[in-house]
Amino acid sequence: MEYPNQSGFRQRKLQAGVRMRGTPGDPRDPSLLFDDTSAGGDKHDLSGVGKGPGVCPGQALISDPMSNLALAYGSSLASHGREMMDKNLDRFIPISKLKYYFAVDTVYVGKKLGLLVFPYMHDNWEVIYQQDTPVAPRFDINAPDLYIPVMGFITYILVAGLALGTQNRFSPEILGIQASSALVWLIIEVLAVLLSLYLVTVNTDLTTIDLVAFSGYKYVGMIVGVIAGLLFGRMGYHLSLLWCCVSTFVFTIRTLRLKILSEAAAEGRLVRGAKNQLRMYLTMAIAAAQPVFMYWLTFHLVR
Amino acid sequence: MAFTLYALIQTAILFTNAIAVLHEERFLSKIGWGAEQGIGGFGDEPGIKAQLLNLIRSVRTVMRVPLIAVNSVCIVLLLLFG
């Protein structure tokens, strides 16, 4: 392709920290966001400007200067629109903050899944801070992340489809219904927690995304329960769901205790006072809602 | 229970409407939930009741105009599509 503006357009397209590709023949660079499909088109751009019409006689489209102009205008309009959309989207959904929650690696995911199923041996539940900002989840197992909840949600929908399929109750709409149903319950739960946190006037640094993350951790227990139910029948489902409910309950309490309660109460010392008691009740209520939801969202899948 | 996102939107609109129709003078003050009764002392922590009254008053103030628009849209859509 010998379009003269090709490199400019693609340069604007690959923003966000991607360095200009010197040679298109590089091996796959991990900092590239998109695959390199130029196939040597970049190198020839500068030389192609001068002899464009002569080199490609078959492409009469670009030999017309008016369509060159139209192409340039169209590409600049597209990139301008894209910039405006990125800027506006960033106002509603904080994309940069979201990236923090996905900065995970395999070791973290493995340890966190183990912690979700067996939180009884873990001692230190505090989140490590680094100059007032929490460290990325990759380096701190106690930090909340969004990778496990998102993957858990998708896996839950797939497992629900599988479970319904084994009972001959499957149809493609069921997947959509399950997905929107679980999503609605998640939204309701997060809104209820936000409302109760506002009413109790807790000074906490829990953001909405943190709450979504903590509410999403229960999908792991649900998946384990449903798969055990598929493999071992109802007894397996009830036993594994009971185990996962208790461990999710303990995990939620131990994680939220540090965030909601005051310093002294969180360390286990008995601090009298109505305020701390109220906060303890709030933590227990949030944690108790998890097993309820876990049962509610899975009992119709295992018969 | 098959909830859809549409049911959630309907619930939200109904709840907001319910909060918006609570009349300040005729109702809330009579049961002791008026706006001026919510501001307790200037102590350090407002209680739950004060927070709740604050929330009701701010929802009513903020959502009054958008609710007019949303309700009109809902009415038109329900008339057209049943």
Image: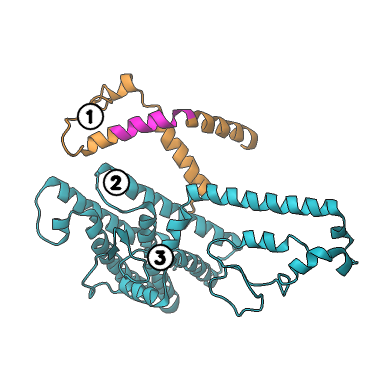
Chain colours: A cyan, B orange
Q: Please, which chain is the residue tagged with disc 2 on?
A: A
Is residue A20 found left or right of A196 in the rendered image? right
Q: Is residue A46 above or below residue B69?
A: below
Question: Any magenta on residue B58?
Answer: yes
Residue A196, labelled with which disc?
2
Mark 1 vs 3: CB contact within 8 A: no
Picture quarter containing residue A11?
A: bottom right
Is residue A1 found left or right of A151 in the rendered image? right
Q: Amino acid at mark 1?
A: Ile
- Secondary structure, mark 2, is helix
Picture quarter containing residue A105?
A: bottom left
Q: Which residue is mark 3?
A: A219
- Between circles 1 and 3, the one closer to the viewer is 1
Q: Please, which chain is the residue tagged with disc 1 on?
A: B
Look at the image and tell me whether residue A2 can be seen: no
What is the crowding at mark 2: few (fewer than 14 residues within 10 Å), some, or many (at least 20)?
A: some
What residue is shown at x 37% (from left), y 52% (from top)?
A208
Q: Please, which chain is the residue tagged with disc 3 on?
A: A
Which secondary structure dominates the residues rendered in magenta?
Answer: helix
What residue is shown at x 51% (from left), y 49% (from top)?
B5
Q: Which residue is mark 1?
A: B39
- Between circles 2 and 3, the one closer to the viewer is 2
Image quadrant where one finds the C terminus of chain B: top right
Q: Amino acid at mark 3?
A: Tyr
Mark 2 vs 3: CB contact within 8 A: no
Q: CA distance from mark 2 to mark 3?
A: 22 Å
Q: Which residues are magenta?
A: B54-65
Q: Is residue A65 above or below residue A139?
A: above
